[in-house]
Amino acid sequence: AQKVTQAQTEISVVEKEDVTLDCVYETRDTTYYLFWYKQPPSGELVFLIRRNSFDEQNEISGRYSWNFQKSTSSFNFTITASQVVDSAVYFCALTYNTDKLIFGTGTRLQVFP
Amino acid sequence: GAVVSQHPSWVICKSGTSVKIECRSLDFQATTMFWYRQFPKQSLMLMATSNEGSKATYEQGVEKDKFLINHASLTLSTLTVTSAHPEDSSFYICSARRGRQETQYFGPGTRLLVL
């Protein structure tokens, strides 16, 4: 079965705190892709990152970083020095040979000033 | 990144009317477009996959006669909600991608309210 689990339903932090959003996936395929999308209150899904199953290098983009670990089937997302503008729902997603995106249930992040 | 637009962003209609939503890829050709539905505080639910020039593939439980999808060109797909009823009220969001295994880029979504 293909599945994405985001166990954290909602996280609240104060500005400048670091926060990690967890994502655990299940797939039997050896070739797959993992994604993170951000959905601010406006509703649009904003693409953040794509990672293929053969590339376990961690990635950093400004205040954002991602930790991909195949051994634990996890693809966690960390925001360093969070800001109010980071408040949104974040979705982790998986795609494999069917090309469909399997979404997690999302984590709502609230950053308070 | 790639830009996907949706029109309209908001629509309010009376029960029984049909509503058409457009999804356009503005700066790339999309061989495949997807239509999703999202209820408040829930994840996205895939409704159908649309390939240019062919019939859409609907997910189980989605009525194809109610949700008509047309993908007439590499930059435009339309979703028509026929004879809309209050239970069809939702947030509809499309995505587009260049090719297989490519990233899906999402439109801004359309909020439909059926009175």
Image: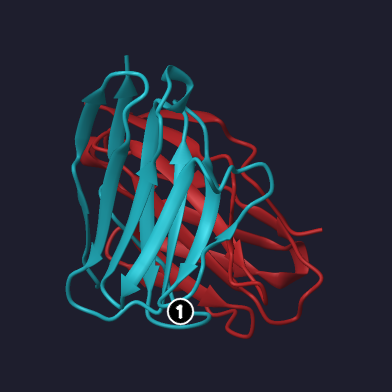
Chain colours: A red, B cyan
Q: Nearer the viewer, residue B68 or B39?
A: B68
Q: In this rendering, does residue A15 appear at all?
A: yes
Instruction: Report the residue marked by disc 1.
Output: B102
Task: Pinpoint the chain carrying mark 1.
Answer: B
Q: Assign a secondary structure to mark 1.
A: loop
Q: Residue furthest top?
A: B115
The image shows residue B106 at horizontal and vertical percentages of 33, 58
Q: Is residue A55 left or right of residue A98?
A: left
**Where does the N terminus of chain B fall, quadrant-wise?**
bottom left
Q: Is residue A108 left or right of residue B22?
A: right
Q: Quadrant of residue B62?
A: top right
Q: In this rendering, does residue B109 appear at all?
A: no
**Where does the C terminus of chain B fall, quadrant-wise?**
top left
Q: Nearer the viewer, residue B25 or A36?
A: B25
Write the residue at 63% across / 52% down.
B59
B77, above or below A103, in the image: below
The image shows residue A29 at horizontal and vertical percentages of 77, 76
Q: Quadrant of residue A6?
A: top right
How many C-alpha atoms fall within 10 Å of the one at disc 1: few (<14), some, or many (≥20)? some
Q: Is residue B41 left or right of residue A43?
A: right
Could you tell me the amino acid type at mark 1? Glu
